[in-house]
Image (cartoon, rainbow, N blue to C red):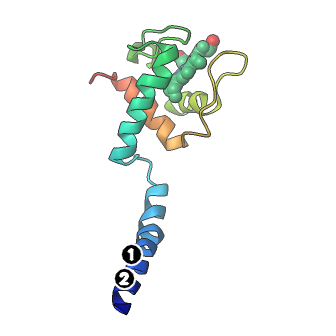
């Protein structure tokens, strides 16, 4: 019984103590997070940039439009928004690697 209790206490400690920092520094979001980001792109970003990213209130975000622009600069736009325009900052919801992942996803074309 006592051993079982120790095991129950040790598993979460090992899980968070060992696994979490490894993920925190990982530039590639976990598969579960990737599907959340994908959903966010379509629902939240798509509400301004168009369901097919051909543009709406926000500029088009198709691969052609993003070509030649720096991935880091575009990720900064996502994190900080563009003051004076409706483009809001997403820093409270996204990390830099997640913003970069979204940009890479848009660059590849969302339907690929
Ligand atoms: C409330 C509307 C709105 C929402 C929601 C929104 N955007 Fe924007 N976004 C804009 C507007 C407007 C611009 C263009 C601003 C300007 O330069 O006039 C823009 C610009 C951008 C740019 C720069 C494009 C370029 O060619 O330089 C990127 C990248 C971008 N948005 C990504 C996103 C992502 C990713 C999301 C979701 C996390 C998002 N936006 C959500 C309105 C929005």
**In the image, 79: left or right of 33?**
right
Residue drawn at point x = 43 percent, y = 36 percent: 101
Question: Which type of secondary structure does the marked residue at label 1 adopt?
Answer: helix
Specify the farthest residue to the bottom.
Answer: 2
Q: Is residue 4 above or below residue 99?
A: below
Q: Quadrant of residue 32?
A: top left
Tell me residue 12's x, y (percent): 42, 71
Specify the farthest residue to the right.
Answer: 84
Q: Which part of the image, by quadrant, shows the C terminus? A: top left
Tell me residue 71's x, y (percent): 49, 31
Q: Is mark 2 within 8 Å of ligand 1?
A: no
Q: Is mark 1 within 8 Å of ligand 1?
A: no
Q: Tell me the CA gap for discs 2 and 1.
A: 6 Å
**In the image, 23: left or right of 32?**
right
Q: Quadrant of residue 54?
A: top left
Q: Are marks 2 and 1 in contact (CB under 8 Å)?
A: yes
Q: Residues within 10 Å of mark 1 (few under 14, many from 20)?
A: few
Q: Is residue 51 above or below residue 72?
A: above
Q: Residues within 10 Å of mark 2 (few under 14, many from 20)?
A: few
The residue closer to the viewer here, 25 or 33, is 33
Tell me residue 29's x, y (percent): 41, 46
Image mark for residue 7? 2
Number of numbered discs visible in the structure rendering = 2
Q: Which residue is mark 1?
A: 11
**In the image, 112: left or right of 73?**
left
Residue drawn at point x = 39 percent, y = 24 percent: 107
The answer to whether one can see residue 26 in this image is: yes
Ligand 1 shows up in the quarter that is: top right
Tell me residue 33's x, y (percent): 40, 44
Q: Which part of the image, by quadrant, shows the N terminus? A: bottom left
């Amino acid at each position: 019984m006592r051993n079982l209790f120790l095991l129950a206490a040790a598993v979460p400690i090992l899980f968070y103590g060992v696994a979490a920092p490894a993920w925190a520094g990982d530039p590639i979001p976990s598969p579960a997070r990737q599907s959340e980001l994908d959903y966010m792109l379509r629902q939240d970003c798509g509400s301004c940039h168009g369901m097919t990213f051909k543009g709406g209130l926000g500029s088009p975000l198709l691969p052609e439009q993003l070509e030649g622009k720096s991935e880091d600069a575009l990720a900064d736009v996502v994190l900080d928004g563009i003051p004076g325009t409706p483009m809001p900052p997403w820093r409270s919801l996204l990390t830099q690697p997640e913003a970069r992942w979204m940009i890479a996803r848009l660059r590849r074309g969302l339907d690929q």
